Amino acid sequence: MTYIINTDKIKRAAIPWEERPQNSDSPIWRYSKNPVIPRNLLPDSNSIFNSAVAYHQDGFAGVFRCDDTRRYMRIHSGRSEDGINWKINPEPIRFIPSQSSINDLKFDFAYDPRVCWIEDRYYVTWCNGYANHPTIGVAYTNDFEKFYQMENAFLPHNRNGVLFPRKINGLYMMLSRPSDNGHTPFGDIYLSQSPDLTFWGKHRFVMGACGPGWQSTKIGAGPVPIETNEGWLLFYHGVLTSCNGFVYSMGAALLDLEKPWQVIARTEPYIMSPQTLYECVGDVPNVVFPCGALTDPETGQIAIYYGAADTVSGLAFTKVDLIVDFVKRNSSI
Amino acid sequence: MTYIINTDKIKRAAIPWEERPQNSDSPIWRYSKNPVIPRNLLPDSNSIFNSAVAYHQDGFAGVFRCDDTRRYMRIHSGRSEDGINWKINPEPIRFIPSQSSINDLKFDFAYDPRVCWIEDRYYVTWCNGYANHPTIGVAYTNDFEKFYQMENAFLPHNRNGVLFPRKINGLYMMLSRPSDNGHTPFGDIYLSQSPDLTFWGKHRFVMGACGPGWQSTKIGAGPVPIETNEGWLLFYHGVLTSCNGFVYSMGAALLDLEKPWQVIARTEPYIMSPQTLYECVGDVPNVVFPCGALTDPETGQIAIYYGAADTVSGLAFTKVDLIVDFVKRNSSI
Amino acid sequence: MTYIINTDKIKRAAIPWEERPQNSDSPIWRYSKNPVIPRNLLPDSNSIFNSAVAYHQDGFAGVFRCDDTRRYMRIHSGRSEDGINWKINPEPIRFIPSQSSINDLKFDFAYDPRVCWIEDRYYVTWCNGYANHPTIGVAYTNDFEKFYQMENAFLPHNRNGVLFPRKINGLYMMLSRPSDNGHTPFGDIYLSQSPDLTFWGKHRFVMGACGPGWQSTKIGAGPVPIETNEGWLLFYHGVLTSCNGFVYSMGAALLDLEKPWQVIARTEPYIMSPQTLYECVGDVPNVVFPCGALTDPETGQIAIYYGAADTVSGLAFTKVDLIVDFVKRNSSI
Amino acid sequence: MTYIINTDKIKRAAIPWEERPQNSDSPIWRYSKNPVIPRNLLPDSNSIFNSAVAYHQDGFAGVFRCDDTRRYMRIHSGRSEDGINWKINPEPIRFIPSQSSINDLKFDFAYDPRVCWIEDRYYVTWCNGYANHPTIGVAYTNDFEKFYQMENAFLPHNRNGVLFPRKINGLYMMLSRPSDNGHTPFGDIYLSQSPDLTFWGKHRFVMGACGPGWQSTKIGAGPVPIETNEGWLLFYHGVLTSCNGFVYSMGAALLDLEKPWQVIARTEPYIMSPQTLYECVGDVPNVVFPCGALTDPETGQIAIYYGAADTVSGLAFTKVDLIVDFVKRNSSI
Amino acid sequence: MTYIINTDKIKRAAIPWEERPQNSDSPIWRYSKNPVIPRNLLPDSNSIFNSAVAYHQDGFAGVFRCDDTRRYMRIHSGRSEDGINWKINPEPIRFIPSQSSINDLKFDFAYDPRVCWIEDRYYVTWCNGYANHPTIGVAYTNDFEKFYQMENAFLPHNRNGVLFPRKINGLYMMLSRPSDNGHTPFGDIYLSQSPDLTFWGKHRFVMGACGPGWQSTKIGAGPVPIETNEGWLLFYHGVLTSCNGFVYSMGAALLDLEKPWQVIARTEPYIMSPQTLYECVGDVPNVVFPCGALTDPETGQIAIYYGAADTVSGLAFTKVDLIVDFVKRNSSI
Amino acid sequence: MTYIINTDKIKRAAIPWEERPQNSDSPIWRYSKNPVIPRNLLPDSNSIFNSAVAYHQDGFAGVFRCDDTRRYMRIHSGRSEDGINWKINPEPIRFIPSQSSINDLKFDFAYDPRVCWIEDRYYVTWCNGYANHPTIGVAYTNDFEKFYQMENAFLPHNRNGVLFPRKINGLYMMLSRPSDNGHTPFGDIYLSQSPDLTFWGKHRFVMGACGPGWQSTKIGAGPVPIETNEGWLLFYHGVLTSCNGFVYSMGAALLDLEKPWQVIARTEPYIMSPQTLYECVGDVPNVVFPCGALTDPETGQIAIYYGAADTVSGLAFTKVDLIVDFVKRNSSI
């Protein structure tokens, strides 16, 4: 039996949930009222997508990518009692330097955040524009009001930096996807290690784009990996290049609990691809991009938040035993 | 108070109009029955979009981009009593040379027309294929039946040539967007001046693509500038390049009345982006492209005609005080 | 009067059919219940499109492109009593070598099949991955259960190989579209000849991409040519490159009965372009791609199966006299 | 007999000259001491090439493209008694606005000058960076010390603007090559007309890149056209794109004396291609690029100055009867 | 001991030869008086390279790629008594149709010939422009005066078609390199088979571009394979893409005598790369491209003719035992 | 007066030296017997360039980029008594893992080494192929015989990693140039900091490609920075993109001694560009690429080793006061 290992001890509300539809045997299914967050929830938002959520206090909090009507990329904090109805701060996050040297860091843009509770606080990682190039920004917060910016983890160009929710072998661990400075046509997932979240090293290749199919152009980690007795459960996105552009789909993998750069299993098929109108039509057609997940260790329920068409946010559900079983049965490793 | 300066004296019908929807505080709003012109209004039209209109006689007349089912680009004249229901001539415009030397000009294609009344006649400018390269064609008409072709204004490659509705400092003025011979990935707005509409010079840079947002790839003038006491009101399009192609949105700017190459204000956010199904789905997904406008100096009402998804024509409304106020409050200049 | 020449003698069922809608004078019209085959007809199919059908026994059989949820390209056999409701084998076709040397042929992928009855058996041609490059695979079957693979017809890189349903001047004839190894931005139709379906030669240029319109980037043969008293009726696809990618439309041509590399007529306009939601939205937006057709020589009815948006299968109808008349009247040759 | 028409009356020195080598029947031959101007003639010059010369006072003067060791593109004036030994001003030309509005023109870079005497002064045209885009700058001088800048002739993007040495039909005439903003992969020669050198119009296509050979990618006018009784003699460059980049060669054409947009003859072969070490090796390998010429109407001698490998200046000789005869015999028009 | 198998019986002259220089242990060495054929051997030749030679009568004959000063690609016949001093016909080869249907074949360009004696005549294969696309032309001659054109072997796009000098298993064999229609950035060697030199099939992948080194972009067969007791000895070119373009080097392989699509050995290092001035400087810098070879079965001497910098022809020498030994010792297969 | 600060204490031999040529006032001058290392110094070397040297024992030692005749990129150690005549080990360096986890690191290729003495040993940094992507490898040696590989410093994609010769503020410092996975068309210099040479962070932008000139495409650090009383003296390369590819030149900068990410001065002109035949002709034309330097603190002499045309190694000389003075006088900062 597969179960979620509960590594943090913060209080939990009931996560959003719908049972799998009758007649479906899919390992994952969409929320019936998608999109869960519309593009115009804020007065001047062009789109709200690729966002991350976490348990917080009696409910939930999150960090949201809200592109404004300038189409500038910004991240905002938000709160929700039920994980469905969100109040997002109309002002972008203004980071407070965690130490004086951080003032040196120019801030150009911010997008695609992840939120990860480790030990005593929430860490936010995001694609941070430094010297106008994308790299991985890191900050922490306790209350989703004040966010303290730390050193960028890596040199440019990098995207999709995702922390593990606990130290492993005494080191913090972060997945990321080195890239170039444009609409990168390649991309593999690597893991980096740190004693202090400031200096990073011991970089390891984890897994790459592969095959002729849905994940042949590039891949990138999605929500914070979920610890299970079968390994770290990682949802990730993969990209196929059609004659009319990129198609982003979702897959899942299991990583070794102690050597998380070793892949135990990985879905050869996607688990979700853009098929609904809100995933296929929008500012970037044909995008399903998971960034956040809420898990309930008691029931094994998982609620995945994903960006749809780079325009709105969708919600999808699975259960840990279903998805882990699917990953293992559909792996080519 | 902002008001429209009425520079021509031709008779005016009531322009199309709908009040701003309840609960909206947007500076611009769509016609509730969009698309106002369907793709197949003509028997063999593939699409009708990026078109220009003007007061004419008791109603309105216009020049329409009608791509036929060969996907050849042609412009047609049309008429309407109410600006909503249009009768478009199924035959493309056949230009009559305004002087014998014009016969030398080969005619390859015609698209994206604008119509501008100056002094005693209507001038049509459009993207004209000369030697198979795009440049700005110029013609005049009095009746939307006979169109007299004049010399092309510029050397290739150029698009989005837009006249001002009166001479300034004794010179005709035209905005345009120099480009290359393909799907140009760059483009700024320039102004050129002419004593006679034949010879052009004193070219001035007006404003360029800018920022990381909706107008970062290229920009181009839309309808004929509208004279207001605050400056020339220019609606224009801006393009962002996503990983899946171009996205065309609409913005607005104010230009100095006497030195119209000087920008007074310019919207940092877009005022309208492709968000409806008819703007996001079609021959070119994600396009909002304004080409024509009708204004009522008495009420300050403005009706903007725009191409949607390079397939159909949409209609949007604003009021001069609303939009000028928005431009000034949202300008980064 | 134009009529279909019935070259095979196999028993025929009633082909799918709907009369032309009232008020339409189009030479071709869509099935009112399109898409006729949904993307998820198979448990693990991502999409079912670009497929070919034929009379078989009391009904119909076909070979279908079914991309699975890995987005791997595979071809499957299927059967139907009415041409509307299809049962597709969930297992891809496993080819049996027709001779021992065929074992040398590596099999990487298979897509866009055509099915052609010649003399005593059905031949399947498809885009076959050999050494990871696309070329034209050839196989035969009698029962749509056992498929015997023959030698690839050509060297890479080739796509859209389409056989003629009888020998001409003692030689088998195949149309194809030489290409490159990617999303080829060029492509003309050639004809090749063979005494034995193994060795091919006497290659002839048939017709090329042309004009500034819908068929300006590349073209490729669609269903098996239909023999009529006016010439071989060929449905084909043409591609236009917009700033946001390829748009695939359908045209038709007439080829000389005895020298089929000579084009008698060819539609300057398309006969069908992507205009419905299922053609404009999907894994590849804006695709109409004909691959199969059923004809009834007695009534002149033709039912065309075409891929829509590289996602689902559509069905369209025409009559031989209507379409041949349209081709002749709208040809620029 | 072909002869040069002497349109200006300024005093003439003896132009540089060498007789055609024995055994050669080439229509053009290189100066035996090439390169005539080395790359480092100035203390901080990286390269001196693509330059223009004219009779001046008792000898010659010119405007020279001197890229400095920043690799910034600048133009300098220079003088010579014999056309061989040049003294170039180490300071770039600082243009004096010919009227106050010219101060608006930002100056970003200057390269590839031409010098043309018309009526009473020397006009300089060059590729002028305006708003960081290339267009045609125009200035005049009487003494090669003070240069008065006039309005740019055209909108960007343009290069290789070349004036005719007299008005034709009462209008100034300029050849140019519209381009894009990079290493333009296309380019044809157009002619524009002006009553006053400020406003330009009546643009005419003259001739385009053609064939599969040396002039298949783009072409551009070289020195000021030379008036002969057989037509305007135009030396021009043509570009072929090999798998390792552009190759620039030289050709010649004859244009109608009164309608100079009409081509009388044009060399199908090049007349000179990069074959010496100083033409094949340098900052841009494989470039022969003519920009200036000195003619002696009495002898028919022509000395052509051309850039070699974008690094140094070469000199080549021909005679008007030889070259005109060659153009006419080797024309495909 | 390795020796050459003498398959033809035509009379042989002494092939060009120089012994390996002292101190060299290279498997191949250049002719001390290279380039053996200068670029301007013909009055209007721009370059002479990538050419093929054969024993003929008392000496040698060949087919030469001579690009003229239009830079049009043409092939010419030539003769030599000693293989060093060549007389090339200044007129390109005018092919005589070998049968009436060949008249249908448009002739656009011809380059990179090979010459192969089989049984009773010389066959010429070359890159033939058909419908403006490259494919493999085939012709035969007995006297290098009259050349009879046969059907093109393949559909476009193809280059480097090279026949084997005898039938194998009753079939003619040809190597070729399928390509695209430009400066193809990929390319592998395939083998095709034919009963009659008109119809071709049984295509087999032979070997591909590989590794990160000199043959990583594409490869193509060079001279006609030389039969040895160790297998068919094939000289071929390989291409590396540097940041400044393609670099063409030469390698060698051994193919199975009866199944020549099976590679016995293949040089991991190149055997010759562009290192001399005439190979590094010219119309295309950095090209060594072998097309022809003369062999002496008695001595094992081999003289290889290769194009240098796409400008001139070089000559290099090896001995069959040296080179076969080198291939076997330096193979990674 | 500018002087070199002698941070290491190892014994010094006399570095290679030639005085500045008469009549020259250049801040840098070439060795009169360049290339100092020919391409074929090793039996199977294709090229030897982009290499680093250091004082060692009684003379000098170095690490050399030796591409073999497979064109595989490898680094070799070498020794010299005089810095002119080098003995390079024909076997590439085989790294010994410095700790067991290093065994995980796949080794694909190695190029462009630098050598830096810090405290008690030599550190080698190079472009290391990990998972087939370039990143910065790190190793140490004491004897140039045994090299111990440490963790890669960064995630891919990175090149030109250059250590500072001492800790600053208690941290090791490394310059590098983040890139993409091909012939990167962009590139700035960043600085990263580390307490232990394993974990890196506190990344700072140092300086970027700039201007329209020689350093407009990308830049990268060259030899180990030289400590002077005026700041760290950094030689670096800059790249300009011509229509025929990249041109690599050399510049110099001064960085703040304690905050070395702050640029004090930087040459607007290059100090050396490819102008000799061995710099302009070779495997990559037009490359001057400095990687190593020897300095004599007593005399202020500096000998710079640089790769020429990616083929051979050149040597150039300067004096610290000359070059620092030049940098300060020619800086635009």
Image: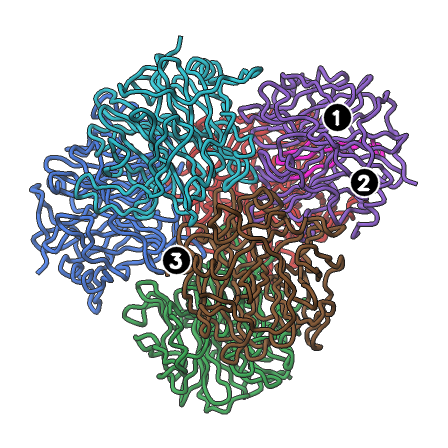
Chain colours: A cyan, B brown, C purple, D green, E red, F blue
Crowding at mark 1 (Cα within 10 Å: few <14, some 14-19, many 20+): many
**Residue located at (39% from left, 13% from top):** A299
Instruction: Report which residue position mark 1 lands on.
Output: C53
In this rendering, which labeled residue sits more in front, label 1 or label 2? 1
| Of the two numbered discs 3 and 1 in the rendering, the one whose residue sits closer to the viewer | 3
Gap in Å between the C-alphas at discs 1 and 2? 23 Å
- The location of residue D157, given as percent across then percent down, is 49, 65
Q: How far apart are marks 2 and 3 (CA)?
A: 67 Å
The type of residue carrying mark 1 is Val
In this orientation, does residue F295 appear? yes
Query: Which residue position holds label 3?
Result: B329
Residue F43 appears left or right of B242: left
Chain ID for label 3? B
Q: Residues within 10 Å of mark 2 (few under 14, many from 20)?
A: many
Work out whether residue E196 can be spotted. Answer: no
Q: Determine whether label 1 and label 2 are within 8 Å by CB.
A: no
Q: In this view, does D252 lie to the left or right of A62?
A: right
Image disc number at residue C260: 2
- Residue in the foreground of this view, choosing between A29 and D210: A29
Residue F11 in the image, given as x and y percentages of width and height: 8, 42
Distance, label 3 to label 1, CA atoms, is 62 Å
**Magenta highlight on residue C156:** yes
Judging depth in this view, the residue of A52 and E166 nearest the camera is: A52
